[in-house]
Image (cartoon, rainbow, N blue to C red):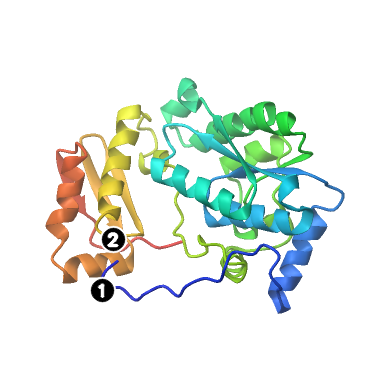
Amino acid sequence: MSGAPPAEASRTLDPRAALTGELAAAAERFRAALAGASSVAVAFSGGVDSSLTCALAVRCLGAEAVVAVLGVSPSLAAAEREQARRTAAGLGVRLVEVTTYEMDDPRYVANAGNRCYFCKHELYTRTFAEAVAGTGSELLLNGDTADDRAAGDRPGARAAVELGVRSPLAEAGIDKATVRALARALGLPVWDKPSAPCLASRIPVNTPVTIEGLGRVERAEADLRGLGLRVLRVRHHGATARVELGPEELRFVREHDLVGRVLAAGRAAGYSGVELAPTPLRRT
């Protein structure tokens, strides 16, 4: 983002890089969580949590024993798919892309507050059937952290427990701050990547999820990133949208008189009305 403080360059990617102190202890706790496993599959998004899970699994088992599994559906932005491909290639792990069909489930489409349960149930079931069994992996892992576990009952996490998906970061007591510190120490290029929930998370509860709505959100957010903005959400409200920006992004837009371009990006995506939220989106 032009005018924003430059991000410090990360180290060269090396899942086996030497670690010290608390980071070394955290990596060893992760190793203990995988004790007895000789091969794993990771439910992979390309974000920092699942990327670190892959990297630490490679550190423990070797790249040949780790498979990254990416669920592909209309709720996955094309840019996120490409990022996941690059990250998996950098780690040297095989990437399996599995098409998921949560849009065929009326309970998911209804978006009644438990949408994530049906999404994750479809993802993990499809992953077990098409990827884990097909590759001979012994365990399916996800990137849930200790902070996620502390957040209490989460529909997606409930699906993971029901289907036997393991969360080694959470089991090792690794929180989100430590995830980023470990990812940085290992040279993961996504160590500072903003969180990127699925496109369906931009649609309010009890508003049905539609292909058209997901497409509008994706187009608007892609155009906004074309302005150099990183931390953002386009909240879908039918024919209208609300753009939320991170603190640095909001300040940058105001200082460089880009509010009009932000609103135009939403209109170009098909929204008849667009507003910019006056308060910043909190980065996670």
List x then y, in percent, for residue 70: 56, 39
Measured from the top left, where is residue 275 in percent x and y?
18, 51
State the residue in front, 79 or 27: 79
Tell me if residue 159 comes above or below residue 151 in the rendering. above
> Which residue is pictured at 62% across the width and 67% down the height?
186
**Mark 1 and mark 2: Cα distance apart in space:** 10 Å
The residue wearing badge 2 is 228
Neighbourhood count class around disc 2 (C-alpha, 10 Å): few under 14, some 14–19, many 20 upward: some
The residue tagged 1 is 3
Position of 153 with respect to 16 (left or right) is left
- Write the residue at 47% across / 73% down: 9
Residue at 24% over, 58% down: 227
Label annotation for residue 85: none
| Residue type at the position of mark 1 | Gly
| Lower position in the chain sequence, tag 1 or tag 2 | 1
Q: Is residue 209 above or below residue 247?
A: above
| Above or below for 17 versus 124 | below
Looking at the rendering, which quadrant does residue 27 occupy? Answer: bottom right
- The image position of residue 207, as x and y in percent, is 35, 32
The image quadrant of residue 53 is: bottom right
Looking at the image, the residue that sits furthest to the right is 36
Q: Quadrant of the N terminus?
A: bottom left
The answer to whether 58 appears left or right of 47 in the picture is right
Q: Is residue 148 visible?
A: no
Image height of 183 relative to 203, above or below: below
Q: Amino acid at mark 2?
A: Gly
